[in-house]
Amino acid sequence: MTAAAAGPRRVSPDEVRARLGEPEPMIKDKVHDHIDEYARRFIAHSPFLTMATADAAGRADCSPRGDYPGFAKVLDEHTIALPDRPGNKLADSFRNLSENDGIGLLFLVPGIREVLRVNGAGYPTDEPDVLARMQTEAKTPELAIVIEVAEVFFHCGRALVRSRLWDPESQALADELPSAGEVAAEQMDADVPPQQLDQLLESSYQRLY
């Protein structure tokens, strides 16, 4: 196998630490094993998060989750529950959690540069009392994902500052990309015109629950 086919050189963990140096003690101290009042308030205001899982072989997957602010429920200082809202029904996260219960969440609040990271173990539940707390638009989810919290900490806002994520001018970049219908028509070699696919997608977005 040639060097090009093998990809760029892999850097060992020791080399990574040597290049980056050690974190400040204050950085290490910000990692907690429970949800304190500040994390609870952040979660209550968050309408969007990303959820990372991996299967038994370590193949990772990350999916977006969103709803009204506070859709993720803090059950107690060591437990969070996420509703499973209607989506593409691939159930990748559920499959992964059945093989490997490791899970990572990244909570965002619009306009706030810092994010909240939560790591732990996850599993699906159909516990009626839990699902009832997640009723929205008169709809109760069929399932929820419970996260047993191991680590909670606020991550600095450098990434969001660099990306200008909350800058309205950044939205102009969307005009440079094809529509979702155009992408779907090309990738799936569909006979349906892109404009019709865009309309179908828009219609599906009207049925959030």
Image (tube, rainbow, N blue to C red):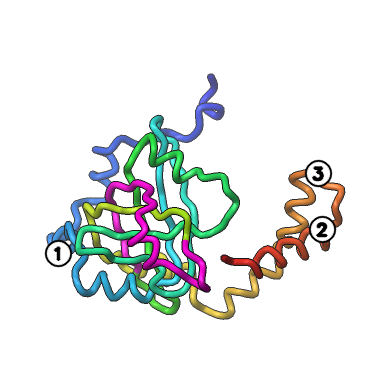
Q: CA distance from mark 3 to mark 1?
A: 53 Å
- Residue occupied by mark 1: 26
On whether residue 117 falls in the magenta region, the answer is yes
Q: Secondary structure at mark 1?
A: helix
The mark that comes first in sequence, 3 or 2, is 3
Q: Residue at x 25, y 58 (%)?
A: 79
Q: Do the CB atoms of the residues marked 2 and 1 lie less than 8 Å apart?
A: no
Count neighbours of disc 2 (C-alpha within 10 A) and say few if under 14, some if 14 to 19, many if 20 or more: some
Q: Residue 74 appears at what percent x and percent y?
A: 28, 66
Q: Say which of 128 and 73 sits in front.
A: 128
Magenta span covers which residues? Answer: 115-140
Mark yes or no: residue 164 visible.
no
- Residue sitting at 85 percent across and 52 percent down? 192
Left/right placement of residue 87 relative to residue 133 reads right
**Residue at far front of view:** 128
Q: Can the viewer see residue 208? A: yes
Pick whichever of labels 3 and 1 is earlier in the sequence.
1
Amino acid type at circle 2 is Pro
Front residue of 178/101: it is 101
Mark 2 vs mark 1, CA separation in Å: 52 Å
The residue wearing badge 2 is 194
Position in image of residue 126 (x %, y %): 39, 52
Q: Which residue is mark 3?
A: 189
- Mark 3 vs mark 1: give the one in front: 3
Query: Is residue 31 rendered to the left or right of residue 3?
Result: left
**Residue positioned 64% across, 69% down in the render:** 173
Kindly identify the amino acid type of the residue bearing the numbered disc 1. Met
Return the residue nearer the eye: 135 or 34.
135
Residue depicted at 27% across the width and 39% down the height: 15
What quarter of the picture does the C terminus occupy?
A: bottom right
Q: Residue furthest top?
A: 1
Q: Is residue 18 left or right of residue 53?
A: left
